[in-house]
Structure formats: C-alpha cells, structure tokens
Amino acid sequence: MTALTLAGDVLVIAGALVFATAALGLLRFPDAYTRISAVGTAGGLGIVLVITGAFLHRPSVPAAVMVVLAVLLQLTTSAVGSMAIARSALLVRTPLSRLRFSELHDESGAEAEPDGGEPPLEALRLEETIADPGEHSERTG
C-alpha cells in the first residue's frame, strides 16, 4: 500500500463521514431550511473528498482533468440546487421552526429594538419582498 493509496482511503472515508453527518442532519434538524443547508454543504464537501480520494488511487493526467471538472460542476450545482430548493420552500410558505433563543428579545420576553431601525424578523412578510410583475411594467412602459 503506497502513501497515495492510503491518502485516498482516508479521503474517501472522510467524505463518507461527511455524508453520514448530513444524513444525521436530515433526521435531527427541525425544519426544511436547516436541512437544506446541511445537505447542500455536506454534499459539496463530501463529493469533493470522495472524488479526490478515488483519484489518488489511480492518478493520471486525464483523471486529474476529470476530477477538476467534476469538483467544479459539483460545487456549482450543489450551491445553485440548494438555493433553488430553499427558495421553493419559501415560496410555498414552509414554516420555520420556533427558535429557542432569539436575539430580538431580552430576558423579560419583551421585544428589543433592533439595530439600525430595521423591523424585527416577524414583521417581514413575503408579500413585501415579491414585486408585482404588472407594477414593474407600468413604471417602465
């Protein structure tokens, strides 16, 4: 067993452990948004570790090119896919889990003033963030 093969084995096992922690996150995290975050992050890192570990078992120039392309495509699509899934969860109004700790409330339970005069998170509404397409066309047209 060479040093490259040993390093490859370690990277493949590390990637498998990252995937296992993502699976644990799917079971343990309370809502869709934190689950999406766990899977998106772990998926990107885990596949990079597994692909790099597999490359170290049989290193060659064509394999290196394929590894670089696979890693770049995985990191790009993982981020875009996670954002698309999170956005769709937001648009169908998937509820957030109740926070156990909130920086917007002091110890007495009263709502504290947020910095910069911004409204608290509960005051933000989805309707205010989505622009009406007809409204935009009337102003520009």
Image (cartoon, grey):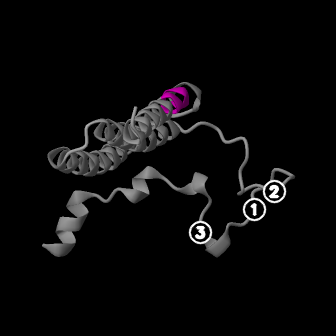
Residue 57 vertical placement versus 76 (above, below):
above
Residue 51 in the image, given as x and y percentages of width and height: 31, 39
Looking at the rendered structure, which numbered label has been put on residue 106?
2
Please name the residue that numbered disc 1 is placed on: 112
Q: Which residues are magenta?
A: 20-25
Measured in 3D between alpha carbons, the distance from the residue under mark 3 to the one under mark 2, in whole angstroms, is 17 Å
Return the residue nearer the eye: 116 or 35: 35
Cβ atoms under marks 1 and 3 closer than 8 Å: no
Q: Say what amino acid the circle numbered 2 marks.
A: Asp
Q: Earlier in the sequence, mark 3 or mark 2?
A: 2
Within 10 Å of disc 2 (Cα), the crowding (few <14, some 14-19, many 20+) is few
Q: Where on the picture, by quarter, is residue 70?
A: top left
Q: Say what amino acid the circle numbered 1 marks.
A: Ala
Measured in 3D between alpha carbons, the distance from the residue under mark 1 to the one under mark 3, in whole angstroms, is 12 Å
The residue located at (23%, 66%) in the rendering is 136
The residue located at (43%, 51%) in the rendering is 126
Please name the residue that numbered disc 3 is placed on: 118
Q: Is residue 23 magenta?
A: yes
Task: For residue 49, say whether it is visible.
Answer: yes
Residue 54 in the image, given as x and y percentages of width and height: 31, 35
Which of the image's four quarters has the C terminus? Answer: bottom left
Report helix, strand or loop for mark 3: loop
Q: Earlier in the sequence, mark 1 or mark 3?
A: 1
Report the side of 33 relative to 104 (left or right): left
Report helix, strand or loop for mark 1: loop
Q: Is residue 91 magenta?
A: no
Report the side of 64 relative to 43 (left or right): left
Cβ atoms under marks 2 and 1 closer than 8 Å: yes
Report the side of 75 relative to 94 (left or right): left
Residue 26 in the image, given as x and y percentages of width and height: 50, 28
